[in-house]
Image: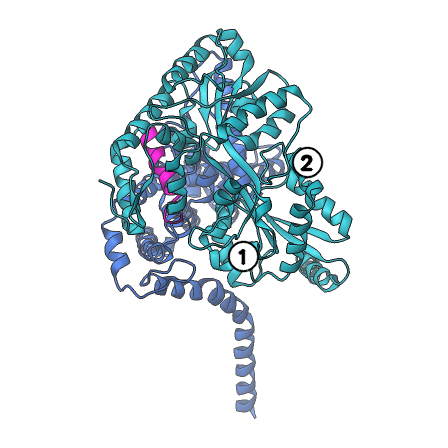
Chain colours: A cyan, B blue
């Protein structure tokens, strides 16, 4: 009898959340609830989270956050759509391009003229139509951070916007930092193909090239192979190889924050976090280096989209109008985000002179976005393969295949899946 | 009258039988049979998990048998299983024998302590193991450097990376198999140990001549469960190495996941799953036969 009682108690505990959930759904008749899909658990100073809270406080509505990392969103979203269990608002980088039919055209509800055209083109434009399925929220660009104390110790002068380093100078100085700057690694780079791709653009390469009205696969071109070979050499000498060879979940941003890295290739989205967290040493933003064929920076970011079949799509549109059309709200968001602005008439004006100086450098990176990158973006090649490209690079960096074989193999796969020919 | 009563009793028995079986049968059908049938059906299509689903016949299977990555990830899975299996069985057996011994103190405390990792999710195990074996900031490398040793490249050496996954897997499951072995040891008659003591057997002889042979059915269960779990290792790999360095710890389930969920090739992933299921079933069958049908014969 005792056992039966115990069993019933356990059953009741398990069942409690199920019934509790059911009750909360039934009670949702007062203030409306906006469900928002985010890619990561918001930190205390997260700009989007703060502005959502402000909207909720002003309107008396509630915000329900659902956190699914970007990679998992790709597989979970179709299931949500099939089960008709969609969030009202989605903060995304790719979903609108993978599943364009599932999202509302927001140009019909928001005046697109208020946005920076580049931000709309990179984040929000559906290249297969004229629709705008995603409104730019966090507008970011790749950039380079440096450990100012390590530079000073190694006697290295920080490059300027007018006189950036070449790739060879970068490598030489990374070596010097490792030898004399008191850092373990001369440089580090996020394990993201978008960071690495700057190297191929600097070297005159690209993933695809225009082929009439379509595209051709260019990822195994001579310029790309040379860029990868150089990158492998960097990994073997001045970078924490495990990050790019795989085998670890370590984040190179932590290495930089701990003062173990002299030069760190990442993006403007890290700035706010670094500004809050790094107190043990001086750091700053330096201009990215210039390759044989010129400079390169990659723009990106995330946007806000509304699933066409979401129950609360009207509420989501109300929030978007409140967020974008009242510039004071977007200004507040931007001040918290400390990022580039995706609205024409709203700019971030920091009070701290250090931030002002860093932002001048960040802003200078915008002009470095290459034509080759824009072609690659238009091709939407990532809809065919994405992680697989990083895996191909990873195997080459680890040394299990040569740079050429790795890129040839990936080029053939991409060509087969996309139906595009290999570029001559 | 007696015949009617017998018939009524028989019906009651049948009803009782179905009442006991139906919940399990329903769950088995929903969570195993239907997915299995669906998976087999998908393997003959080019299903992309979204809107494309055309019948492609045996195309997926033909591609699969020509796919080098399939063979290499399956081979790595077998090597990993063979390497880890002895530890999965022997360590819990020894610990179970130890905590059942009258000479050991704090037995309940020890059992609880060893069982705790079983309660942790694979993700938490991954985080803990990363904290221990991180090349840069890990505890193990810190201890090594404290003794003037050279830190080990846990993430860059394929053998060390495989060892770390195996270590994590063993750590997380030792408590579970220990409990199974404790149940087996408790089931051995004390008369046998008393007889052995009278015959002058020492502890080691008793362990190898009585405990181990009498635990044959339990050992078979532990070997079978361990083998299947090792062949299916996924979450720990994701949490610790993500299949790296390169693809040196990419095992077959990771490969299936990559094909299905990253490349959106659900049809092809289903074909691999189907073939892998047959291979795993064959392995389990061979184990069953080699162990005299689980120690029953």
- Chain at tag 1: A
What is the crowding at mark 2: few (fewer than 14 residues within 10 Å), some, or many (at least 20)?
few
Give the image quarter of residue A21.
bottom right
Nearest to the observer: residue A150 or residue A216: A216
Sequence-first disc among 2 and 1: 2
Magenta includes B94? no
Secondary structure of the residue carrying tag 2 is loop
x, y (%) of residue B244?
39, 35
- Chain at tag 2: A
x, y (%) of residue A59?
76, 52
The boundaries of the magenta stretch are A383-397
Give the image quarter of residue A208.
top left
x, y (%) of residue B108?
62, 39
x, y (%) of residue A351?
69, 24
Q: Residue at x 75, y 62 (%)?
A: A27
Q: How many marks?
A: 2
Nearest to the observer: residue A238 or residue A53: A53
Question: In the displayed image of the protein, which residue is found farthest to the bottom?
Answer: B1
Q: State left or right for residue A344 relative to residue A227.
A: right
Q: Residue at x 45, y 20 (%)?
A: A187
Locate the N terminus of chain A by quadrant.
Answer: bottom right
Q: Which residue is mark 2?
A: A44
Magenta includes A391? yes
Nearest to the observer: residue B25 or residue A329: A329
What is the crowding at mark 1: few (fewer than 14 residues within 10 Å), some, or many (at least 20)?
many
Residues behind callouts 2 and 1 on a single chain: yes
Secondary structure of the residue carrying tag 1 is loop
Nearest to the observer: residue A76 or residue A159: A159
Q: Residue at x 43, y 35 (%)?
A: A194
């Amino acid at each position: 009898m005792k056992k039966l009682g115990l069993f019933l108690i356990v059953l009741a505990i398990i069942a409690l959340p199920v019934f509790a959930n059911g009750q909360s759904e039934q009670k949702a008749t007062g203030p409306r609830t906006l469900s928002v899909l985010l890619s990561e658990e918001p930190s205390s100073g997260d700009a989007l989270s703060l502005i959502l809270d402000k909207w909720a406080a002003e309107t008396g509505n509630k915000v329900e956050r659902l956190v699914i990392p970007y990679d998992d969103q790709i597989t979970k979203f179709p299931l949500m759509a099939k089960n008709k269990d969609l969030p009202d608002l989605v903060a995304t980088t790719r979903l609108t391009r993978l599943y364009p039919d599932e999202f509302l055209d927001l140009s019909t509800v928001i005046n697109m003229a208020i946005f920076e055209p580049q931000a709309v083109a990179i984040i929000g434009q559906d290249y297969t139509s004229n629709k705008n399925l995603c409104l730019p929220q966090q507008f970011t660009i790749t950039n380079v951070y440096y450990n100012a104390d390590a530079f000073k110790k190694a006697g290295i002068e920080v490059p300027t916007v007018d006189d950036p380093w070449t790739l060879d100078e970068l490598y030489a100085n990374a070596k010097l930092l490792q030898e004399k700057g008191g850092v373990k690694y001369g440089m580090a780079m996020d394990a993201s193909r978008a960071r690495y791709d700057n190297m191929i653009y600097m070297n005159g390469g690209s993933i695809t090239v225009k082929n009439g009205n379509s595209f051709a696969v260019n990822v195994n071109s001579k310029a790309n192979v040379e860029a990868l070979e150089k990158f492998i050499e960097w990994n073997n000498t001045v970078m924490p190889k495990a990050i790019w060879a795989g085998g670890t979940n370590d984040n190179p941003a932590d290495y930089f924050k701990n003062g173990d890295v002299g030069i760190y290739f990442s993006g403007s989205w890290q700035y706010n976090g670094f500004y809050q967290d790094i107190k043990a040493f001086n750091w700053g933003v330096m201009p990215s280096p210039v390759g044989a064929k010129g400079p390169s920076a990659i723009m990106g970011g995330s946007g806000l989209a509304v699933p066409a079949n979401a129950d609360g799509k009207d509420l989501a549109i109300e929030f978007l109008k409140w967020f974008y059309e009242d510039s004071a709200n977007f200004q507040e968001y931007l001040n918290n985000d400390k990022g580039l602005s995706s609205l024409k008439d709203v700019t971030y004006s920091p009070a701290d002179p250090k931030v002002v100086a860093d932002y001048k450098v960040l802003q200078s990176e915008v002009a470095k976005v290459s034509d080759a990158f824009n072609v690659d973006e238009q091709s939407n090649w990532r809809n065919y393969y994405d992680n697989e490209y990083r895996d191909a690079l990873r195997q080459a960096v680890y040394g299990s295949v040569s740079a050429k074989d790795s890129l040839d193999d990936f080029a053939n796969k991409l060509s087969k899946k996309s139906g595009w020919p290999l570029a001559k | 009258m007696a015949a009617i009563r017998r018939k009524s009793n028989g019906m009651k028995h049948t009803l009782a039988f179905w009442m006991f079986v139906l919940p399990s049968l329903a769950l088995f059908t929903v969570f195993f049979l239907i997915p299995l049938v669906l998976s087999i059906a998908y393997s003959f299509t080019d299903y992309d998990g979204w809107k494309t689903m055309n019948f492609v016949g045996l195309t997926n299977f033909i591609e699969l048998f020509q796919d080098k990555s399939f063979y290499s990830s399956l081979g790595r899975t077998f090597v990993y299983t063979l390497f880890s299996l002895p530890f999965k069985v022997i360590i819990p057996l020894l610990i179970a024998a130890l905590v059942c011994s009258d000479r050991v103190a704090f037995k309940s405390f020890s059992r609880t302590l060893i069982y705790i990792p079983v309660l942790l999710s694979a993700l938490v195990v991954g985080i803990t193991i990363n904290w221990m074996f991180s090349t840069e900031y890990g505890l193990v490398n810190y201890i090594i450097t404290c003794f003037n040793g050279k830190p080990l490249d846990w993430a860059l050496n394929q053998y060390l990376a495989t060892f770390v996954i195996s270590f994590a897997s063993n750590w997380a499951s030792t408590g579970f198999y220990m409990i199974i072995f404790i149940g087996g040891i408790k089931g051995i008659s004390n008369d046998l140990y008393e007889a052995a003591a009278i015959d002058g057997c020492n502890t080691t002889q008793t362990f190898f001549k009585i405990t181990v042979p009498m635990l044959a059915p339990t050992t078979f269960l532990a070997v079978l469960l361990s083998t299947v779990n090792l062949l299916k290792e996924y979450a720990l790999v994701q949490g610790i190495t993500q299949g790296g360095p390169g693809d040196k710890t990419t095992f077959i389930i990771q490969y299936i996941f990559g094909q299905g969920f990253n490349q959106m090739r659900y049809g092809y992933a289903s074909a691999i799953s189907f073939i892998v299921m047959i291979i795993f079933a064959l392995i389990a069958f061979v184990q069953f036969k080699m162990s005299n049908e689980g120690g029953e014969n």
